[in-house]
Amino acid sequence: MIGVELVKMLRRPRTWVTIGLLNGLPTLVAILLALTDLGPRPGTGPAFLSAVLSDGTLFPLAALAIVLPFFLPIAVAVVAGDSVAGEAQAGTLRYVLTRPVGRTHLLFAKLVSVIAFVLLAVLVVAATGYVVGTLLLGDQPLASSVSGTSLTPAQVTGRTVLSILYVVLSMLGVAAIALFLSTTTDSALGAALGALAVLVASSVLFTLDAAAALQPYLPTRYWLAFVDLFRDPILWRDVLRGVLLQIIYVAVFLGASWANFTTKDITS
Amino acid sequence: MTPVRRWLLVALGVCVLVLTPTAIRSLPVADSDVSAADLLQRVQDSASVPYSGYAEAVGGMQLPVSDQFSDLAQLLGERTRLRVWWRAADDWRVDALDITGETDLIRSTDGLVMWEYEAARATYTDDPPVRLPRAADLVPPVLGRLVLGEAVAEEVSRLPAVRVAGREAPGLRLTPADSQTTVDHVDVWVDPDTGLALRVAVYGAGDTPAMTTTFLDLTTQRPAAAQTAFTPPPDAHVDYDEAVDIAAAADRFAPFTAPDRLAGLDRRITPGVGAVGQYGRGVARLIAIPLRDEDADPLREQLLTTTNSRSGRRGVSVTVGPLGLLLTPHAHDRPTWLLAGTVTQRTLSTAARQLADGPELIR
Amino acid sequence: MIVTRGLTKRYGAVLAVDDVDLDVRTGDIYGFLGANGSGKTTTVRMLLGLVLATTGKIELFGQAMPHAARSVLPQVGSLVEGPAAYGHLSGRANLSLFDAMGTGGPRRTRRARIDEVLAQVGLTDVGRRAVNAYSLGMRQRLGLAAALLRAPRLLVLDEPTNGLDPQGIREIRELLLQLHAGGTTIFLSSHLLAEVEQMCTRVGVLDRGRLVLQEKLSVLQAPTGRTVVRTPDANRAQALLDGRLERRDGSRLLVRGADAAEVNALLVGGGVRVDELGAERRSLEQVVLAATEGAVPGSVTP
């Protein structure tokens, strides 16, 4: 079933349109940077953007930092929100289930397919970032870590791979929330918007001092911790917490999806 | 399984996940029978203890200042995430992290390097005796020694132990005897084995601390020497600066000198060394910085536009939590002084009057 | 093959399906009749495990549903409330995906089986075209093809000729009859009486959630024991048939007695001209109307 879901995802034009759109903004930023040579002021703007002015090989990370806060979660919410509700809307859900495909099995396959989508999207963004970055911004033999130590190209590659994995994991929570909402409604759009509402709420609460007690539980809390992978030595604290938090979100919302979906009357 | 049972199962799982951290946090902490005086002594003797860790400091003091003082304002008013490797008082590294980079201070016997990632700049300076507060001062053991270093046994009492960074830390409350200070009390939780302060909370008036700093991770092993060594990366800008901040610059270059005694407080450093005067003991501290007009005038403008500032004969003053600021008025024959510290406004205006009416202090 | 006992579905206060005991036997073409909103689709969905019964039992092939869905459903082909497919994919790709779902049909024979079902429903020529470009009738055929992919023992079809032109309807009917001849049991839910009348061997009638009738079509349409006569000499005929006339409707007479030949001989012997004469059989429409009006079948006069 996982294979079937992957084929469905990969053969869907929307998948590729979304990934194309995701690449648009970082590419535009790279062009602007190359033309103006103006980095953001310290403490503002996405991480790594000032560093890429001298070293284009870091642009994959800057590209991830650009898409991570908004574009990527929106794409994930749309894809995951569509996963069950979209099939219900199109009427294919009843034929899938009478093949038969076990409902829990279907949920799991849908989640795997969403994760595969995120991985694909992030890889394409990183690869495009690398090509665009080295072409437009040039490269450097030795990159420096955020802490000011030198990193060999092998270290940069290794840490970039870790960052990519971390960004993919960071999207798990959104995916699980959207998947759950997707099982509660026959409207794919509604599920996606619901998941986005959760994210917006999380972002608002994250900036609010009064919500300090809630902050460790917010799905967006540790998203930007992938910068910590480029400190020297790597600061694992927030990265590990971020991964754990996402796993918890997946467990809770996949559990909720299961509770809701396994005996739901399919009337679509 | 019925839907109700399934939902109950999920709800149970959520409860377990949400409550586990709370439950761990509320595990009873065994209190220590160490006395307040003994604990104070351990803190005061902890200067040579090496450690490394991760700490977070949260300041609640919104200073209405910018330009030369904006780093200070950020330090006192916001959350600062700190990584620290401490080998000795002249061999350490403190990284102040933010989401887009970090600003690091690396101290060696040669002096100080500041590394700013986003500017890709390494700035070498000396580590002067007179300077503004910096991120490294918010590392709990540093702040703990700063507030307790001159305390006496009569000023401290015991607080119940809490768990900080996985350690059971008995607490100390410093209630300063000095009537000139605006600090109401300071709570410090201490690792009893090493005397390192693990959490420090400074209170002015009111129940919310003006500044807290706490370790979230700590190891008391001596960090590797490589960890506190720094070589700028090849493409970095390397600067050499003569003074680390505006206070250090004034201290070195201003053609004045602060008096030996101000508002009843004694000057802390050997008199006549520099232009800037640091006064007081313990948590009653006052600093007097002579400013050039190009620094003083924008600061005065800014303080005047602040809603809770007061303007008077002695200058414009503002109070932020336990911190008081006073900028003396412009005068032809004398420098403009910036007076700041954890002392009462009365002390500040007394100091301002003495600076205005006292003998001229040209060096 | 399909047996339900006390099957009931309640949505809040609404009783959608009320105590239905279906009995579909191997080899049947079972016509499941009912007006729109009578609970047909809900019943079909319950049979397939899509909707869970509030109370009651369902058995398919002697196994309890939805508990045994995993072993039962691979032997069932279904078309529920219109076809559905992934629009951006071709018909072939859709069939290939549906076949791979769940336990999956054997991969080795997939291509051949897809070719076969496409030929069966008459879509061979457009199999490679994206479903988005299909007409409703083509989609209906594709849905049927998907149902036939694994050569099911039982076909559960909900309005299978919806959206087809008369030619298409006839083709599908012939296909179903051919499958039936090959041993497939067919459960056909429909609101089209003519369709059911032409094909089915057994009929169940659902009215406002209750199964009001379930019988062999041949039994329902058995002669009623009366003879219908149409004659231009109605008055004379009436006189001849004295006492046996049940009803007169202009030139149409309803005569007690099942032996049409005997009635004919009587009339012709009496010099009555006969336009038309035959044993009375009730149409399915009459049966259904009678059943759904709450009256006991058989006591109704047309």
Image (cartoon, helix red, strand yellow):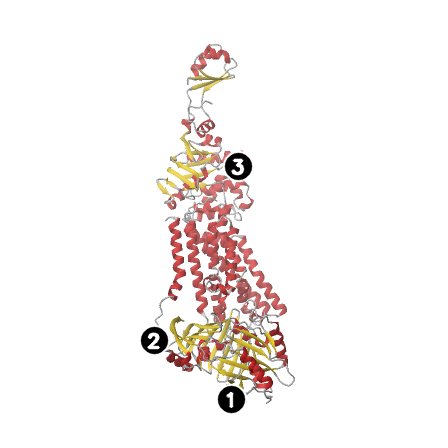
Residue indicated by mark 3: C164
* Disc 1 and disc 3 on one polypeptide chain: no
Q: Chain ID for label 2?
A: B
Q: Amino acid at mark 3?
A: Leu
Q: Amino acid at mark 1?
A: Thr
Q: Which mark is residue A113?
A: none
Tell me if mark 1 has few (under 14), some (14-19) or many (20+) residues whose alpha carbon lies within 10 angstroms of its own. Answer: few
Q: Amino acid at mark 2?
A: Asp
- Is residue C151 something one can see in this rendering? no
Q: Chain ID for label 3?
A: C
CA separation in Å, label 2 and label 1? 40 Å
Whole-percent x, y for residue B113 in the image: 52, 80
**Dot 2 lies on which element?**
loop
**Looking at this view, is B289 or C20 the one in front?**
B289
Residue indicated by mark 2: B33
Whole-percent x, y for residue C181 in the image: 42, 34
In this view, C147 is above or below B342 = above
Tell me if mark 2 has few (under 14), some (14-19) or many (20+) residues whose alpha carbon lies within 10 angstroms of its own. Answer: few
